């Protein structure tokens, strides 16, 4: 047994590679192997399988992949090799001898190479190490950041090994070999200067000076054009060495030239660009805590020169991560600058990207920066933190007012705010105007030539902000609001800075800032779980930390278990009048009645996202009305639009909405279940037209006000793929609520996607549907589900399980009077019988299915039966019968059923080859492959091209086959 990461992630056994399945499972295996013999937490696995917000049922998905992977290992007798996949609390451990892992053998060979005194032996070790690579590291996995970083580290190690091999060849005087080794890699990595320098040196020592100089000039031009930098010291030194005609220094083989992953993980050197700034020659850092806002040196120089619009003003507030000097104290006799800012927020964590965005927004002339986001997300904390850190940029003062736009006590009157501002700016109380317009005019006049910061917190609408805007071009205004205030964007060119929830890492740091690092480090997994249960909402995190801080004997894990119960989570996140429910209540009470109605119904949605059609079904309205309500909810940051027409609810907001109208839960659920059934029926009919309906509708089915229209097959298939997770959640919710008649139908309607991606772990969902069908005691439903489940199990290689299920299906269909269902059951049973060696019985059952379909006049089912019959006849060495069956099926006209047509053309071609008509057989197989490629049916393309490669070795077919296999590896997620 061998585990491979250096190429396609795989497990090789004596009988061939294990069928790992979709990319998510390969990613799980890769994450475990990268930390072999070390526990890997659920949180870390989540980061490795999703690069954005993971689905709510993440844990179940990971557990399913672990279970399948464990079964594969057990089935391959992994225990005999000392391999074991074990569960350790909230983590998993893949225990294995390190000699079975190719990355470990790679590192051992590098170590051996460094220990050799004879360069010839070093060459052997290094070549053996490089031979372990079968392609780019971690091929076939999901491109999540942790796995991308690991792949990058491994690739750096490989390239360093190539450089070391070339150096060792040079030590043996084999400079042409060194150049040959380096040229391929230098061409593939044209901006890696160490490769270019090594290649230049090897070419020069091989007597090819002109080639060496040409490579230098090519690299220099590329660096200048692509990165705007000059060659670094290593490349420049190699160039100078060639010009001097000197032998040049040899690079040592030792720890300083280590080629293992530990060296590859070091940051690459920085090169000086034309403007003198340091620029990383390697991959840019993604840690936003080290990101500097985009402010140019030119802007600073313009300011110093007194340029237009910037005279007398610091053009750039300091970067949010840079220490900021306090504003200079006034000299004796000068009035102190106004400062109404509340104290800086305690325990502020993260937000590097938001601080940088705020710095960029504040860089223009008289900017109005609009910090928006949902209740409790930390808008005020962000604004105050930025204001305190950039105090030096505003020597004339910093003003602050809480406009109380979402307060039970009502909004602050504009005149009240203006009075406070004017008094702070030195206006005598008796000289403060009595009208808002006059006070606003005086405020604008006094701030005209000042560098002043104005923070307006909790604004409800644009009208409450406009009278409070300062008049100076050098003033900056920060406005925070739960609403988007698009009117302020239109009238005053306000620059939006939307604020989202905290990442789990920053949420954990916030907990540590309140509780102390020792308490969080003692329970790191529970701390991260708490951050996730709080949904990254700073207010929820602070409430959680407050509860724990006052109860030192409570464990983080204990509170996490309490919060895991959705029924009581909001109760635990409510402290006096500052909790999450209180914050949300103040937002909701500002909504119109129709928006409140839509909001409460969204709380009962079983899925993770919704569109206007789904929202309309939940609320019992139409999509136009629902879309308008969603826009109002988005303006209040109660829902978030993640893509055009696609919305989500924060978990805590969803729980709050659900609690507003619990009595409507069942009605909303039934409405949305019927919406999914109607929409999935339309999608299936568009994706695979011409077949009989999947089922009859339930007697009490309520059609939605409108159903999405699918214009073509691609649109329908995209919808089925995009909604797969939510359809599964809907089926689970239906079964939990006792709506079994809806549960199995929602699952069964995904059959076009099941056919298209048959090996994508559909069996758990189909088993849920089977449970619901049996709960209904409905033979019709049970037979229909068994047909699809049995076929999926067959494709997964679980033949014995498939036979046990499918043998019951024809009888159930007959009991229900479902003759077409019986035909389908016979087809599926025949397929698994043929795979299990019962070819004669399979041929007989398939022929019976053809007869039943013809009697019922259903061309779709007849064509399906003929397709499988043809394949079985080919297996039984009856090529002429197979050809006749395939041609008969094609004659039924499956032009619009692309997958079916591809499979029939493939059988046609193979039958002709078996009959000796090689030219026509190759033509038909090529036609099948081409149609599969056009339809993006990769399984069909692989099958047709495999058949072609058995009779011809054309490079074109090999290339297309490898591309189809690669697409399958990437697409099965």
Image (cartoon, grey):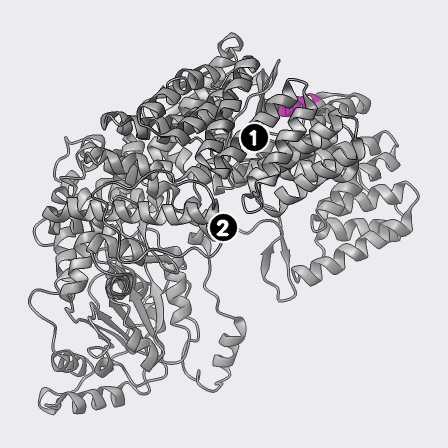
Q: Are dots 1 and 2 in contact, CB under 8 Å?
A: no
- Residue 273 seen in the current view: yes
Q: Which residue is mark 2?
A: 713
User: What's the CA distance linking mark 1 and mark 2?
Assistant: 24 Å
Towards the viewer: 252 or 549: 549
Q: Earlier in the sequence, mark 1 or mark 2?
A: 2
The spot of residue 767 in percent (x, y) is 34, 26
Q: Is residue 173 left or right of residue 844?
A: right
Query: Element under label 1?
Result: helix
| Quarter location, residue 867 | top right
Residue 866 marker: 1
Q: Is residue 663 left or right of residue 898?
A: left
Q: Main secondary structure of the magenta part?
A: helix
Q: Residues within 10 Å of mark 1 (few under 14, many from 20)?
A: many
Q: Is residue 341 above or below residue 807?
A: below
Towards the viewer: 39 or 594: 594
Q: Is residue 527 above or below residue 536?
A: above
Range of residues picked out in magenta: 105-112
The spot of residue 877 in percent (x, y) is 68, 18
The spot of residue 271 in percent (x, y) is 64, 55
For the point 64% across and 62% down, the residue is 273
């Amino acid at each position: 047994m061998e585990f491979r990461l250096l190429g396609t992630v795989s497990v090789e056994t004596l009988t061939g590679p294990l069928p790992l399945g979709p990319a998510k499972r390969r990613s799980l295996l890769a994450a475990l192997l990268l930390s072999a013999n070390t526990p890997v937490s659920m949180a870390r696995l989540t980061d490795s399988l999703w690069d954005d917000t993971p689905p709510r049922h993440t844990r179940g998905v990971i557990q399913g992949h672990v279970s399948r992977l464990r079964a594969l290992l057990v089935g391959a007798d992994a225990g005999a090799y000392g391999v074991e996949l074990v569960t350790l609390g909230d983590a998993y451990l893949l225990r294995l001898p390190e000699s079975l892992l190719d990355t470990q053998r790679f590192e051992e060979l590098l170590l051996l190479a460094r220990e050799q005194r004879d360069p010839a032996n070093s060459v052997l070790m290094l070549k053996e190490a490089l031979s372990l690579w079968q392609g780019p590291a971690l091929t076939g996995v999901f491109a999540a950041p942790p796995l991308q970083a690991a792949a990058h580290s491994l690739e750096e190690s490989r390239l360093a090994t190539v450089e070391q091999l070339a150096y060792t060849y040079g030590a043996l005087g084999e400079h042409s070999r060194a150049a040959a080794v380096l040229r391929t890699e230098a061409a593939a990595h044209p901006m890696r200067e160490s490769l270019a320098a090594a290649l230049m040196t090897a070419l020069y020592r091989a007597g090819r000076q002109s080639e060496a100089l040409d490579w230098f000039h090519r690299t220099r031009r590329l660096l200048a054009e692509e990165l705007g930098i000059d060659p670094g010291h290593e490349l420049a030194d190699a160039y100078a060495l060639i010009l001097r005609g000197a032998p040049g220094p040899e690079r040592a083989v030792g720890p300083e030239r280590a080629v293992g992953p530990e060296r590859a993980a070091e940051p690459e050197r920085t090169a000086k660009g034309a403007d003198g700034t340091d620029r990383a020659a390697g991959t840019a850092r993604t840690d936003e805590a080290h990101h500097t806002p985009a402010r140019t040196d030119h802007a600073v120089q313009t300011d110093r020169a007194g340029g237009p619009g910037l005279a007398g003003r610091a053009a750039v507030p300091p970067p949010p991560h840079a220490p900021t000097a306090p504003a200079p104290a006034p000299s004796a006799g000068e009035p102190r600058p106004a400062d109404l800012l509340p104290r800086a927020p305690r325990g502020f964590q993260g937000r590097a990207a938001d601080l940088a965005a705020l710095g960029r927004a504040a860089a223009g002339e008289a900017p109005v920066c609009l910090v928006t986001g949902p209740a409790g997300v930390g808008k005020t904390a962000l604004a105050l933190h930025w204001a305190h850190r950039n105090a030096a940029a505003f020597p004339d003062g910093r003003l602050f007012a809480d406009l109380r736009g979402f307060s039970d006590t009502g909004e602050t009157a504009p005149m009240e705010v203006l009075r406070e501002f004017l008094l702070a700016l030195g206006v005598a109380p008796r000289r403060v105007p009595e009208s808002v317009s006059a006070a606003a005019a005086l405020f604008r006049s006094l701030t005209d030539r000042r560098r002043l910061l104005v923070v307006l917190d909790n604004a409800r609408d644009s009208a409450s902000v406009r009278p409070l805007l300062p008049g100076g071009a050098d003033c900056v205004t920060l406005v925070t609001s739960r609403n988007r205030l698009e009117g302020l964007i239109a009238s005053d060119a306000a620059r939006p800075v939307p604020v989202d929830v905290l990442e789990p890492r920053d949420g954990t740091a916030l907990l540590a800032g309140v509780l102390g690092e020792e308490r969080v480090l003692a329970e790191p997994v529970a701390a991260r779980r708490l951050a996730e249960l709080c949904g990254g909402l700073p207010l929820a995190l602070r409430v959680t930390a407050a509860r724990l801080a006052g109860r030192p004997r409570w464990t983080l894990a204990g509170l996490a278990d309490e919060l895991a119960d959705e029924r009581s989570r909001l109760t635990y996140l409510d402290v006096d009048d500052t909790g999450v429910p209180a914050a949300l209540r103040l937002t909701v009470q500002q909504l119109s009645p129709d928006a409140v109605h839509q909001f409460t119904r969204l709380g009962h949605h079983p899925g993770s996202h919704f569109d206007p059609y789904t929202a309309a079904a939940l609320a019992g309205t139409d999509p136009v009305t629902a879309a308008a309500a969603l826009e109002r909810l988005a303006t209040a940051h109660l829902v978030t639009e993640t893509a055009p027409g696609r919305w989500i609810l924060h978990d805590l907001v969803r729980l709050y909405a659900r609690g507003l109208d619990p009595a409507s839960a069942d009605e909303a659920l039934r409405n949305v279940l019927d919406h999914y059934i109607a929409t999935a029926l339309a999608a299936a009919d568009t994706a695979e037209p011409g077949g009989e309906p999947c089922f009859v509708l339930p007697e009490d089915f309520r059609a939605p006000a409108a159903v999405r229209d699918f214009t073509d097959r691609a649109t329908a298939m995209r919808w089925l793929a995009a909604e797969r997770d939510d359809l599964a959640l809907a089926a689970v919710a239906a079964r939990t609520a006792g709506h079994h008649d809806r549960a199995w139908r929602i699952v069964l309607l995904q059959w076009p996607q099941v056919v298209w991606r048959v090996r994508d772990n559909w069996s758990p969902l189909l088993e849920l549907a089977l449970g619901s069908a049996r709960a209904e005691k409905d033979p019709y439903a049970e037979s229909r589900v068994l047909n699809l489940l049995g076929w999926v199990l067959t494709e997964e290689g679980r033949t014995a399980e498939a036979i046990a299920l499918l043998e019951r299906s024809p009888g159930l269909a007959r009991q229900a009077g479902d003759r077409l269902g019986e035909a389908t059951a016979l087809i599926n049973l025949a397929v698994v019988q043929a795979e299990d060696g019962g070819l004669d019985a399979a041929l007989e059952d398939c022929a019976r299915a053809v007869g039943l379909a013809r009697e019922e006049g259903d061309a779709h089912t007849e064509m399906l039966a003929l397709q499988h019959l043809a394949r079985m006849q080919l297996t039984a060495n009856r090529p002429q019968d197979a050809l006749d069956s395939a041609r008969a099926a094609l004659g039924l006209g499956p032009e619009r059923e692309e997958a079916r047509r591809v499979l029939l053309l493939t059988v046609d071609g193979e039958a002709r080859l078996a009959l000796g008509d090689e030219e026509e057989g190759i033509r038909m197989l090529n036609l099948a492959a081409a149609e599969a490629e056009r339809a993006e049916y990769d399984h069909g393309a692989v099958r047709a091209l495999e058949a072609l490669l058995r009779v011809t070795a054309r490079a074109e077919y090999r290339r297309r086959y490898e591309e189809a296999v690669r697409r399958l590896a990437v697409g099965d997620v």
